[in-house]
Image (cartoon, rainbow, N blue to C red):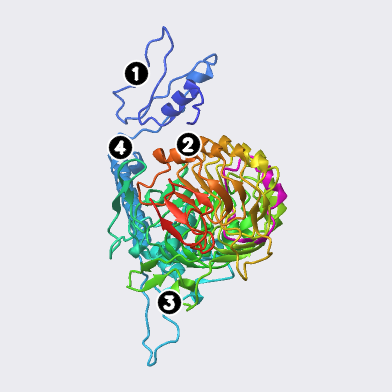
Amino acid sequence: VSAISPVDNSSVDIEVLRHSFSPTLSMRDGDEPNVPNLSNPDGLAVATAVAPDDEPDYVFQAIEYGPDAKPPLHKNRRFRVYTYFALFLIFIAVVLIVVYVTSLSKEAEVKDTIVRLTSQPTFKPTSPPTTYREAQGLIEQLQAGVLLRNENFEDMQVTDPRRLALDWILHKDEQRLVTDSVNLYQRYGLAVLAYSMDSKAWYFCGNPGENFTETSCSVFSYAMNKTVDYGVWLSGESECDWFGVTCSNDGIVRSVELISNNLVGVLPHELTALRFLQMLALAGNCIYGTIPEEIGQLDHLFTLELHENGLSGVMPSTIYQLEKLQLLNLAKQYGVDRVCQQSNGTKIYTIYKHGGFVPEFNVGLTGKLGSEVGRWKSMKGLYLSENSFTGEITEDIGTLRYLTFLQVNDNFIEGNLPSTITNLRNLRRLQFDDNFLYSSLPDDIGNMKDLERLSVNGNSMFGKLPESMYELKKLKSLFLHDTAEANSPWLINDVEGFSGSVSSSVGRLKDLEYLLLNNNPITGLIPSALGNCTKLKVLRLHRTELEGSMPREVCMLRDKDLNSERGVGVLYADCRPNNKTEEPRVQCNCCTDCCDYTTGVCVQDD
């Protein structure tokens, strides 16, 4: 708002007087008014004498006056009104024309182009029609800001998911994003994911219809115990409303969660367009191929869940760059036998490499867990089971002080359990079963006070059971079985299996539900203190060197949780005649299954 300057009223009055069409004469207080001589036949103004002592403010210039004269045209009031009105109409017309031309140019999808017919087909497809947004440089911006590996759109096949996503952004997306749209990159990145994973084949919210007219879908949420409405992928809805996508209040994509939704395809490295992504969960689908190295650029990731797919190849070393990771789950790529069907009817088999396009058995992810593991300072859950990782576990694993779950079972890990493993005081689950370990249990394993599950079965373990193990009062599952059964090439040393006896301190493990000691050279008697483990559901003591009678205190557990109501054998011992003819090693009248120590045959007795 402009400030209004004060105006000298006397100056204004003077200007008004100067433009008056009739003579204006002055008089002072107390004077008689000076009236023009109306009897003057010539109609001329009469000059009046002025005294020398009169003030100059009262002296006015004589004005020539013509009784028949008309005022100039530009001073005619009616003319000025018409002129202003005409100018106003012209201004309105100009504004309307400008608005119409601008909107017409933005809405026009195609410029008129003269196409000359050629006698022979061209080797490259004719360039698509140019849109208004293409002229703004939208293609160049996406190419420079999202595409990696020195790629460009011109070299891509028309069926490439990245080209399809570009075509959708330019011609089919109702959002009509332009170069300065803040969500351009993330919307394009999600579109690439949709086309890469054949969204039309998804179980939920992936098919927008032939003309992209489907905008909403309803999915029952077990977490909320109700049906929830979402936006369909590749619809005109905000990408923040699409099923499985979560954004922060500023509209930035933070999470993509599409678990068990029949995603079929290869992970695109254009996922890096989701620069502030904190959670990527695509587990339980038919994703094959390798993990792109560019995954390491998503340095805001807290959670990466790709388990139970058909991934293969080396785990990229760039994944160690994700230093904010708290959950990494790449488990169950090896031997996952899932069949998915694409929208065109093609079937994908995760048990084979690249979904069956390569006729080789898929062995899952490979690589070694080297010292770079120590970069995951925030890691809480590390799940790498059922893959083909090799090498030894680095001592740096002990620096992950927040680690709560460590599952590396069913791989080809070898060597010793690192001594630093007992530094993981928050660890609740430690699973190294079915590897190539040749190790004993650390003597100070009792320091892991929060441990609930310990699984080292299926390795070449040796040594006595540490006394400190009985200090793990939160322990629910103790799997130490099958460590004396290794055959070539698993056989590492003839001295295999846990030895010594089961201490009466086992009764301290009040929360123990599963105790499996079978196939170990454990000696001595079965301690009656086992009867204090009143929550036991499965107890397997067969194919050991244990002898004597099953304690009455243990048999009494059959009236509690140690029963076979579900048809599952729960109490095993060597209570069958040994080698069919000799006395049983253990006398037991409450066992569900009795085994022959020599032949290994077990027969249900209960």
The reply, left or right, for residue 314 in relation to residue 48 is right
Give the percent coordinates (x, y) of residue 320: 64, 56
The segment highlighted magenta reads: 414-436
The residue that mark 2 highlights is 534
Residue type of the residue flagged with mark 2: Thr
Residue 265, how many percent across, how many down?
A: 44, 67
Crowding at label 3, few (<14), some or many (≥20) Cα neighbours within 10 Å? few
Numbered badge on residue 35? 1
Q: Residues within 10 Å of mark 4 (few under 14, many from 20)?
A: few
The residue sitting at 41% across, 71% down in the picture is 349
Give whichever of 327, 498 is nearer the camera: 498
Mark 2 or 3, which is nearer the eye? Answer: 2
- Classed neighbour count for the residue bearing mark 1: other residues with Cα under 10 Å, few (<14), some (14–19), many (≥20): few
Q: In front: 65, or 217?
A: 217
* Residue 427 showing in the rendered view: yes
What amino acid type is highlighted by mark number 3?
A: Ser
C-alpha span from label 1 to label 4: 29 Å
User: Relative to 502, is 294 above or below?
Assistant: below
Q: How packed is label 2: few (under 14 Cα within 10 Å), some, or many (20 or more)?
A: many
